[in-house]
């Protein structure tokens, strides 16, 4: 992929991501549960946009979760991370969040993480 194609792809992704985020901010003053996904890992942050702070985070690349994640598929890892972020959100005193999927489609690992977080008690 040459430089111009990469730039176009980045612009398209950023535009889609900001569209999702704009709708979330317009409709809610709840903290935003933002997801970032790579080919191997998945990360989640609970962000308070009003204060500009991260309240809680979880990632499949954390050292203390490696034993629990060993030998699992990427979707199973996303489910574990969904449970972890739900517990950490509750510890931070947050029950309701706005789900920010970014430019990712709501299926596969993203859906698995969201379903597990809901099951663990978070309200979207």
Image: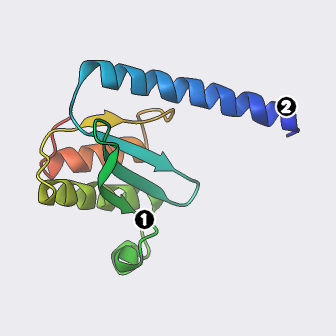
Q: Residue at x 16, y 56 (%)?
A: 92
Q: Residue furthest right?
A: 2
**Foreground residue, 69 or 11?**
11
Q: Residue at x 32, y 49 (%)?
A: 53
The reply to whether discs 1 and 2 touch (Cβ–Cβ < 8 Å) is no
Return the x and y of residue 100 as percentages of the image width and height: 37, 35
**Foreground residue, 56 or 39?**
56
Q: 10 Å neighbourhood of mark 2: few (<14), some, or many (≥20)? A: few
Residue 60: quarter of image: bottom left
Question: On screen, 34 above or below 82?
Answer: above
Element marked by disc 2? helix
Q: Nearer the viewer, mark 1 or mark 2?
A: 2
Quadrant (top left, top right, bottom left, bottom right) of the C terminus: top left
Residue 4 bears which disc, if any? 2
Return the x and y of residue 47 as percentages of the image width and height: 32, 45
Element marked by disc 1? loop
Its colouring scheme is rainbow
Separation (CA) of disc 1 from disc 2: 32 Å
Name the residue that disc number 1 marks.
60
Q: Residue at x 21, y 60 (%)?
A: 88
Image position of 37 (left or right of 63): right
Q: Residue furthest front?
A: 51
**Foreground residue, 68 or 94?**
94
**Foreground residue, 30 or 82?**
30
Image position of 63 (left or right of 89): right
Image position of 46 (left or right of 70): left
Residue 11 bears which disc, if any? none
Q: Residue at x 43, y 43 (%)?
A: 108
User: Upstream in the sequence, badge 1 or badge 2?
Assistant: 2
Image position of 68 (left or right of 1): left
């Amino acid at each position: 992929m040459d430089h111009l194609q990469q730039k176009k792809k980045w612009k398209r992704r950023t535009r889609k991501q900001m569209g999702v985020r704009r709708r979330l901010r317009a409709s809610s003053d709840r903290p935003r549960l933002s997801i970032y996904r790579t080919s191997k890992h998945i990360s989640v942050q609970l962000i308070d946009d009003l204060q500009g702070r991260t309240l809680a985070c979880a990632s499949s690349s954390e050292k203390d979760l490696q034993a629990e994640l060993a030998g699992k598929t990427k979707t199973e890892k996303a489910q574990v991370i969904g449970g972890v972020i739900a517990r950490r959100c509750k510890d931070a005193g947050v029950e309701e969040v706005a789900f920010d999927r970014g430019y990712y489609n709501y299926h596969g690992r993203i859906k698995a993480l969201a379903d597990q977080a809901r099951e663990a008690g978070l309200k979207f």
